Amino acid sequence: MSHHDALIIGSGISGLTSAALLSKKGKSVLVLEAYSRPGGYMHSFRRFGELFDTGAHYVGSMCPGQPFHTLLNYLGVYKPEAFVPLNPDGFDVFHFPEGTIRLPMGFDRAAQELASHFPSETAAIKSYFDLIQKTVAHFPTYSFDGDADMTRSLEALQTPLTQVVEPLTQNPRLQALFYAYCGLHGVRPEDTPFGLHAIVVDSLIRGPMGFSKGGDDLTKTFVERIEAQGGRVLMNRKVVSLVVNGDNVSEVVTEKGERFTADWVISSLHPKTTFGLLTDDSRLTGLFKDRVRQLPESGGMYAVYARAQGLDWDPLQNHYFFDTSDPKEMFRERGPDEIPAMVFASLSRTSSNEGGKKVFSLHSASPYKWFERWKDTKYGKRPDDYKAFKDKLTARVFAAVERYEPGLAAKIESQVSSSPLSNLHFNGSIEGSGYGLYHSIQNTGARAIGPRTKILNLLVTGQNYLFPGLLGASISSLRTCGHIIGIKPVLEELKELGERS
């Protein structure tokens, strides 16, 4: 039985960030991963000779001195060649029935571009972007300011996005544009904490970049750094129980029967999974256990991964295709026979897009309940009716995009698709959800779970406990590890490094 200062369950970006930070500070760390490869949503995969990403499509705040760039640099895992800057003149393209809007990099340029489409809304656009920038400064693990006013950040997490936007503008088309990034965290505008949305918008406008070699490359760098600092990352080690003695986890037991001990245990798993592993949950109140059981999940995603010929898309741009610009309808749940309200298209930055070839993925909301009847079937051996249902969904995804890109389906050379059941199989995400918990106001900020728990040496980290996405999951690890090594010295070091960059 081996003993470590910290044992981390799960090797997604939050688990790897925790391991890299703690080992950097001299702690002995062990990461246990259930799957055969590390990385979680940073996984890449190959189909018909092309490389596709599952979740690492693009990330923000990646210019020198900005938060994610600084954090990766601080952890020793930043490699310039691993990232590619997106098109500064329009990294995201929003398609609405009334027209197309390209969002350029930088707040000044973004405000000018939006004002050219909404000339009577110049003041509203400026006020919205000003609020975004002022709000993110109050989040210490994003601004790296240990003296940030936490009351302001908590207030922002208790304020609905709609409550900020609607007083600024009554123009439904501009409201829809301000709400467009709700597709990146899966929360409806009326439920979205403005603080969460502000960090998403700020990070992307300031420093959007894609992955030149896929998310797996960043994972590989993380693992190498952790091991160079004396840590270990073990695959095929599914944790099946956390043995509780008194107030602490005394042993971590894997499916293989291995037993590990640690001063601290950090779980990056979903709270329903984490607390379900406890051999004794008597320290958890009945009210807390009921709350965890009743936590709603974010929606699932249906994805099409394709290669096409003759498609005139810039590989350094993403596309958001909306069926409507009605802010009340744009994130309404559609049925499986309806055209999706939104389709997100991400072009591969890892595959050759020369000679008219384009490699890309299309993503649309698809609730788990659509697929629940096949939940007991096995990956790779699902029945014909499942495949037929997926074919129908693929056709409706293409139909949504063809409104703006006529003839897309005819240009497809090869394609494969995935459903929430695929996510459940590879990532163990409850109900195959795309973003873990539904990150509404009710589950965020002062109402969020963790990072401390009633089990004194058990901490939690990851997208379920702060914000979804690579950035949100990684900065959640700063909060978590701060309970072990102290957060203020780390924030001071990060701030100093960012200012030098």
Image (cartoon, grey):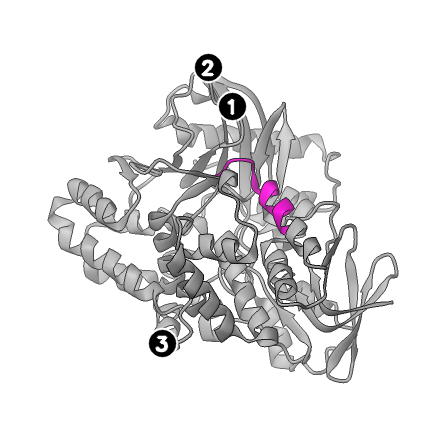
Quarter of the image holding residue 17? bottom right
Q: Which residue is mark 1?
A: 352
Q: Which residue is mark 3?
A: 149
Main SS type for the magenta part?
Answer: helix
Question: Which of the image's four quarters has the C terminus?
Answer: bottom left
Identify the secondary structure beneath mark 2. Answer: loop
326 over 497 or under it: above or below: above
Q: Which residue is mark 2?
A: 355
Instruction: Tell me the kind of residue under disc 3.
Output: Asp
Identify the secondary structure beneath mark 3. Answer: loop
Q: Position of residue 389 (x, y in %)?
A: 60, 33
Q: Of residues 460 and 278, which is closer to you in this image?
A: 460
- Judged from this view, the residue extending furthest toward the front is 500
Q: Residues within 10 Å of mark 1 (few under 14, many from 20)?
A: some
Instruction: Tell me the kind of residue under disc 2.
Output: Gly
- Sequence-wise, the earlier of marks 1 and 3 is 3
Q: Residues within 10 Å of mark 2 (few under 14, many from 20)?
A: few
Label 1 near label 2: C-beta < 8 Å?
Answer: yes
Q: Position of residue 388 (x, y in %)?
A: 62, 29
Q: Residue at x 29, y 43 (%)?
A: 325
Q: Residue at x 39, y 44 (%)?
A: 208
**Is 221 covered by the magenta stretch?**
yes
Q: Residues within 10 Å of mark 3 (few under 14, many from 20)?
A: few
Q: Residue at x 73, y 83 (%)?
A: 247
Instruction: Tell me the kind of residue under disc 1.
Output: Ser
336 over 412 or under it: above or below: below
Residue 195 shown left or right of residue 421 in the figure: left
Label 3 near label 1: C-beta < 8 Å?
Answer: no
Extent of the magenta region? 211-222
Q: Does residue 127 appear anywhere in the picture?
A: yes
Q: Position of residue 30 (x, y in %)?
A: 73, 61
Question: Which of the image's four quarters has the N terminus?
Answer: bottom right
